[in-house]
Amino acid sequence: MKRELLMGNEAIALGAFEAGVEIITAYPGTPSTEIPETAARLAKQYGAYVEFSTNEKVALEVGIGASWAGKRSLVTMKHVGLNVASDSLMTLAYTGIDGGFVLVSADEPECHSSQNEQDNRLFARFANIPCLDPSSPQEARDMTIFAYDLSEKFSIPVILRPTTRVCHGRGDVELGEINIQKREGKFSKDFSRYVTVPSHARILHKKLLDKMDKITDYIEQSNLNYILSGEGKIGLIVIGVSFNYLMESLQSLNIKPPVLKIGISHPLPKNTILSFIKELEKVIVIEELEPVVENDVKIIITENQLNLKVYGKNLFPRTGEFSTDLVIDILSKFFRINITKEQSNPVSIPVRMPLLCAGCPHRSTFYAIKKVTRGKAIFPSDIGCYTLGFSRPLQTVDTCISMGASFGIACGFAKSVKEPIVATLGDSTFFHAGIPPLINAKYNHSKIVAVILDNLTTAMTGHQPHPGTQLTAMGDPANPVSIEKLIAGMDIPVEVVDATNVKSIEEALKRGLESEQVYAIVSRGPCVLLKGLEKKPIYKVEASTCRACKACIKLSGCPALEFKEGHSNIDPLICTGCGLCAYICPVNAIVT
């Protein structure tokens, strides 16, 4: 055994290798991305295969195929990705698996980088499959290994649900030996199991229910759920990362009530819970987001006619992340403990709107869109760096709800309003979920301008490859798919423009707005962070020519620009030489 300081995501990847995983699939999404990235760096060394799939549903299905061939597979995604993958997951619960199958759903209370903070413990209950909730990087590794054993023992997919603070927190992790497996891939045909026609599905559903009853009995013996003995008639039940906050809080408050730490949220260890609460007078359930465990505890109390009070979401918030300070504050009031709060001296930090990077190719495209439409259009958009186009001065993002939604929403607007519709989404998002709604626009005569912002990478999550790029997740040459050829194959007018050539973008937009059918524009330019230290033109402001109109600042919103000493200035440490400000300047005061 060896010990390493690891991020939770790294611990999951290494735990999977210890468990003998051979196939790892993913779609990148915060806070899950470091799992496949870690795996990809080590895959060839350990004889495994890693891919970034087109989307989460495809990732899940690739994992299913590997599992049905007998290989242990790992599928990773962020919480909202499970919405995309759920169609196949629901039926996979019926058919079961062959090689161990672990699905990582990285949930994000507080939605630091997400459009919602859904609690995917509810998805585990919906599909009726096991769900494990680690509280630390060590548990993330341990539960990954346990999940594979549980999966194969009962032929069932297992969800591992770390949250952001587990994924991105670091801890001392004890690791075992890497288990390099080379199972022979073999698929044994069984129509009654793998072909879920209604007559088969009805039987498989009953088998799933029986299977989960057996798993419920099995997990009662697991050390992932355990009791910390204490004093008094008030007990605490805690799950996930909140366990760490609770332990720190109890130490600060100098109290030692009994604690039940739950590591498996579905199925719950009902007998363990019952034995813990039956002698108590009050029980407090501490869990982020939904009252999942709390509601089940109430059912257990009712079924066993116990007389005790349950506290949970009537004390703790149903939104956002918890913290040690929050738990201390709530428990000190509940236990009537006076605490002395340290006087804080808050630092006044200037508020800065989230902005696209200096030189981002999306900025010039959004500028052109706003200029050509004069802002008098509807701008459905999507999930990605370009979502930042909602802020001033660009303000060319009116909607953002899920990946690929912009083109579909645009179709709805096109049938409902008179304003022109200019929809935007990114290159990775286009492959993920943008193709079907674009086909829908063509088929149903939706007059929209569909702009694909192609920065040649999946930028927001850390520059992962996608089907339009040259490399795979493992760094091997890919067979890239051309966005424009794909669109042309739909018989949709499409043109490709250079994202740094604002004039060409404007002209393309004018043609698109004049078109009587769906019109596609691919605005292509590499993410500025990928361009690195390449030579660039150095722009400066001629103070004698500048008339202090601030047009360059007000219209572009570029963070490299500032106004001081009576004229605009360019910070050479931030400027990337894109030239947008020079294009905007009405008096040609910005020169190289």
Image (tube, helix red, strand yellow):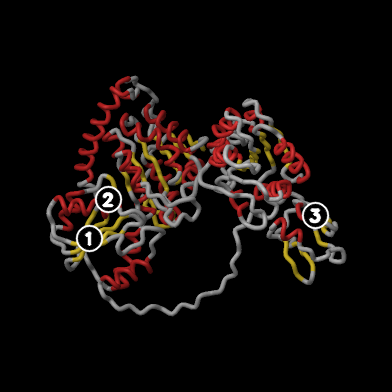
Q: Is residue 469 visible?
A: yes
Q: Is residue 457 above or below residue 237?
A: above
Q: Secondary structure at mark 2?
A: loop
What's the distance in space between the residues labelled 1 and 2, CA to CA? 23 Å
- Callout 3 amino acid: Ala
Which badge, 1 or 2, comes first in the chain's sequence?
2
- Few, some or many C-alpha atoms within 10 Å of disc 3 (few <14, some 14-19, many ≥20)? some
Q: Is residue 288 left or right of residue 541?
A: left
For this view, does 533 lie left or right of residue 334? right
The secondary element bearing badge 1 is classed as strand
Q: Describe residue 444's horizontal placement relative to residue 485 as left or right.
A: left
Amino acid tagged 2: Leu
Which image quarter: residue 281?
Answer: bottom left
Give the residue at x 73% y 54%: 576
Q: Badge 2 is on which residue?
A: 224
Task: Point out the frontmost of discs 2 and 3.
Answer: 3
Task: State the CA–CA distance, disc 3 to disc 1.
Answer: 65 Å
Q: Classify 13 as above or below 519.
A: below
Where is residue 376 drawn, in percent x and y?
67, 49
Return the residue nearer the eye: 203 or 411: 411
Q: Is residue 307 above or below residue 217?
A: below
Residue 233 circle label: none
Q: Kindly identify which residue carries mark 1.
A: 310
The residue that mark 3 highlights is 582
Give the residue at x 20% y 53%.
Answer: 273
Give the residue at x 85% y 58%.
587
Is the residue 182 above or below the residue 398 in the image? above
Give neighbour class at mark 1: few <14, some 14-19, many 20+ (Cα, 10 Å): many
Image coords of residue 39 (percent x, y): 47, 42
